Image (spheres, helix red, strand yellow):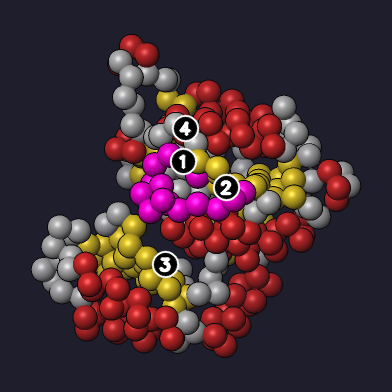
Amino acid sequence: MTASQVTLVASDLDRTLIYSAAALQLTMEDAQAPRLLCVEVYKHKPLSYVTETAAGLLTELTDATSTVFVPTTTRTRKQYQRIRLPGGPAEYAICANGGHILVNGESDRDWQRTVARRLTDECAPLAEIRAHLAATADPAWLLKERVAEDLFAYLVVDRAELPPEWTKELAAWAEPRGWTVSLQGRKIYAVPRPLTKSAAMREVARRTGATRTLAAGDSLLDADLLLAADRGWRPGHGELADAGWKAEHVEATAERGVAAGEEILRRFLRASGTR
């Protein structure tokens, strides 16, 4: 395989390619609903699905010699490793919003050191951010506080009780400290600015010799990934859709829910020249 032949396909997972039961959006009659394949089990119960059609499309994509498929997620490594995607394990995967590049399932130490150096040089420490969250979050709406991979923090909140100005005030406080804040569903993320999916995607492209990148994602944390790719797609649902987010080279799918996962995979196959 020569460099000119390689297309890197970086795709978000949750609510882009894989879907929980609550996110499927099966609006058709029950008898016309697609057959589903479970791709994740958590605590002995099925959690995430793709359609059988999507499973076939993803296998076709991963089998193509001209593409490198890279699952790209904000999930921790442990959360990602619960997923069993059709087509077999990916050689490369991006976890923790770009904090880890997995190579055949193992976190790349060189990339870990690169990320750690940038966070130390450019951002306030995680401990400072957590202390501020603990001091300012109200138990009336705070449900959980979590840390992902010792890289970033997020809160699970009761949206109905969350004052709208609180997130804006947190973002204003975090910005000069090198951190970004985003509200997605019931979660408020505080993420170091250098910790991006796009940086990790560029590194994988460099290592694989890819000269073209395709990407997909549904959330605000996927915006940098979509902007960095040569072409991108976002589902007709999700935070980016709700925000009316647009970019010239990024297309929205007509489909919503699990059907959007099928549409994105078809777009990947056509754009990569596999079909």
Q: Is residue 37 visible?
A: no
Answer with left or right where residue 136 lies relative to residue 208: left
Pointer 2 residue: 250
For marks 3 and 4, give the one nearer the viewer: 4
Rendered residue at 67%/33% (across/down): 269
Rendered residue at 59%/25% (across/down): 56
Sequence-wise first label, 2 or 3: 3
| CA separation in Å, label 3 and label 1 | 25 Å
Total marks placed:
4
Extreme residue toward the right, this view: 2
Marking on residue 235 = 1
Marking on residue 148 = 3
Q: Amino acid at mark 4?
A: Ala
The percent position of residue 124, horizontal first and vertical second, equals 45, 87
Q: Is residue 175 visible?
A: yes
Marking on residue 178 = none
The percent position of residue 107, horizontal first and vertical second, equals 61, 63
**Do tag 2 and tag 3 residues touch (Cβ < 8 Å)?**
no
Q: Amino acid at mark 3?
A: Ala
